[in-house]
Every structure is written in C-alpha cells, then in structure tokens.
C-alpha cells in the first residue's frame, strides 16, 4: 500500500499522503478505495468487505474505518440490508438570490418540503436587530424539512416580521416556495443577502427530523435577505447534510 494515486487538481495533492509516506494504514486504504469508487460509477454496489480487505491486504477493522470516512464524505452510501453503494453526486445550491426550489430544479431534481412548525413568536434581541424591529414584536417562524426527489437533505427555519407581512399566513402555502409567495403574491423584490456558512453537527432533534446520523457533519447557512430599499425581508437558518450538499458561488472583483 505504498502507491500514491496520480495527482489531480480536484483532489488533495498526492492524495493527502506526505512524501515520507508515514500515514495511518486506513488512510492509505481510503485513497486506494476512492480511486476504485470512481471507476465503479454511481449506484454500483461495493465488493464485499472480505474481498476488499484481501485486495488491499488489510484487516476488516482498517477497511471499515476507510469506508466509514468515505460514507461521511458522501462518496459512499450505506443501505441497511443491501450493502454499500457508490453515492450519487452532491446537490449544489448557488450562494445567490436563487430560491431552494429554483436551485434544485436547475439540476433536474424535484424539490419538496415537509412542514414542521408554523408559529408566531416575539422577536428576541438578535432577531429584532436583524429584521430592524423592536424586541418582542411578532414574527412568523416557518420550519420545514427540505427534500430533493423525496430524500430528506436539510432543515430550514425562516423568520419574517409579521408587522411587515400581515397577510403572509393567509397567502402562503407552507409546503410551497416562500420566495415565490413573497415575490409573486406580496410584491417583494429581493436585492441582496448576507450569508455565512459554517460546519456543525446536528442536534438530536435536527438529526431525527432530517433522518441522519448525529455524527454526520452538516453545513449551516445563516442568511439575512434585503429588498431594493435595503430593508430586511427575512432571516433564515438552513442546515444541510454535508454528505449530500455543497454550495457554489461566482465571485466578482470590486475593481
């Protein structure tokens, strides 16, 4: 297991293996296994644990660790009672003023949502500051599980000022596109947004709603959107499965 995979610009240099070659055994297996995964193609079942252990001349314990990391990274997919398969490509959401619905449809994926919570709350200090309202002012909280082709991939909480949008609950289909409701039914024009992305682990409740392992890394997006007058429209907290989701942004020079 001393072979270093050929250099590729879309992967860590030398597959992350230092020149001295001293790395944990499982990591060397993981690099070899990833090369095999790429040749198999999406949906292909992985050879048996025994076959792979013999192929790479390692113990099954070492092989399981390598496979486990590729599962966490979204390269492999375990199905109870069926085996381990090559996972489909990750879904990509642009970091731009594009709704979740539009972003998924551009990829040929059918978006959907499961409504968890629709409620009125009093704004706390931080939310009031972001929405430019007074602490305690009423806000609408909309919490929904995000689906792509019926697969649960995320959980989104959105907060909007009820004072600004008093007709929101009457006009909104909670399972539909909030973006479309705001633009088409309430005449809102989105102009810009401030977003922050970080990695986190899901809480037990979040993991249960999304149907994922609490140890799976998640992508957390915080967003405040603004209209053409610079007034805040919404504050959103969106949690996405790190094994199934990625973000993309096109950057422009200020010069």
Image (cartoon, rainbow, N blue to C red):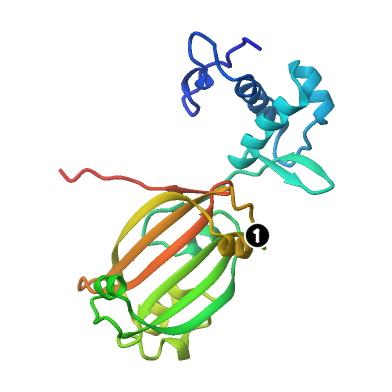
Residue at 50 percent of width and 27 percent of height: 11
The spot of residue 36 in percent (x, y) is: 69, 25
- Name the side, left or right, on which 91 lies relative to 84: left
Q: Residue furthest left?
A: 255
**Nearer to the camera, 33 or 182:** 33
Give the quarter of the image for residue 179.
Answer: bottom left
Does 242 sit left or right of 35 as displayed? left
Q: How many marks?
A: 1
Residue at the image point whose x is 43% and y is 72% from the top: 158
* Camera-nearest residue between 151 and 177: 151
State whether residue 175 appears in this view: no
Question: Around disc 1, counting alpha carbons within 10 Å, would you say few (fewer than 14), some (14 to 19), or many (20 or more)?
Answer: some
Q: Is residue 151 above or below residue 1?
A: below
In the rendered image, which quarter contains the N terminus? top right
Q: Is residue 253 above or below residue 106?
A: above
In the rendered image, which quarter is residue 165 located in? Answer: bottom left
User: Residue at position x 78%, y 18% from top?
Assistant: 55
Secondary structure type for disc 1: loop
Foreground residue, 128 or 84? 128
Q: Position of residue 226 (x, y in %)?
A: 28, 69
Q: Relative to residue 112, is residue 78 depicted above or below?
A: above
> Could you tell me residue 245's position as x and y percent?
53, 50
Q: Is residue 143 visible?
A: yes
**x and y percent of residue 183 in the render?**
38, 77
Residue 235 in the figure: left or right of residue 175: left
Residue on which disc 1 sits: 211
């Amino acid at each position: 297991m001393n072979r270093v995979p050929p250099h590729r610009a879309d992967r860590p240099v030398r597959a992350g293996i230092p020149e001295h070659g001293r790395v944990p055994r499982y990591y060397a297996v993981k690099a070899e296994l990833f090369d095999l995964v790429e040749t198999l193609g999406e949906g292909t079942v992985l050879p048996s644990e025994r076959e792979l252990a013999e192929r790479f001349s390692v113990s099954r314990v070492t092989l399981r660790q390598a496979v486990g990391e590729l599962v966490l990274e979204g390269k492999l997919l375990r199905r109870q009672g069926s085996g381990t398969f090559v996972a489909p490509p990750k879904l990509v959401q642009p970091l731009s003023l594009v709704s979740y619905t539009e972003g998924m449809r551009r990829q040929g994926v059918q978006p959907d949502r499961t409504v968890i919570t629709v409620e009125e709350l009093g704004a706390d200090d931080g939310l009031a500051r972001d929405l430019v309202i007074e602490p305690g002012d009423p806000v609408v909280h909309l919490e929904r599980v995000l689906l792509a082709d019926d697969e649960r991939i995320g959980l989104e909480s959105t907060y909007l000022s009820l004072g600004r949008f008093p007709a929101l609950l009457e006009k909104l289909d909670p399972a539909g596109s909030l973006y479309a409701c705001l633009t088409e039914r309430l005449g809102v024009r989105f102009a810009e947004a401030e977003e922050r992305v970080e990695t986190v682990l899901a809480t037990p409740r979040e993991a249960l709603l999304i149907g994922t392992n609490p140890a799976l890394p998640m992508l957390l997006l915080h967003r405040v959107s603004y209209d053409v007058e610079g007034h805040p429209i919404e504050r959103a907290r969106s949690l996405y499965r790190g094994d199934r989701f990625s973000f993309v942004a096109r950057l422009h020079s200020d010069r």
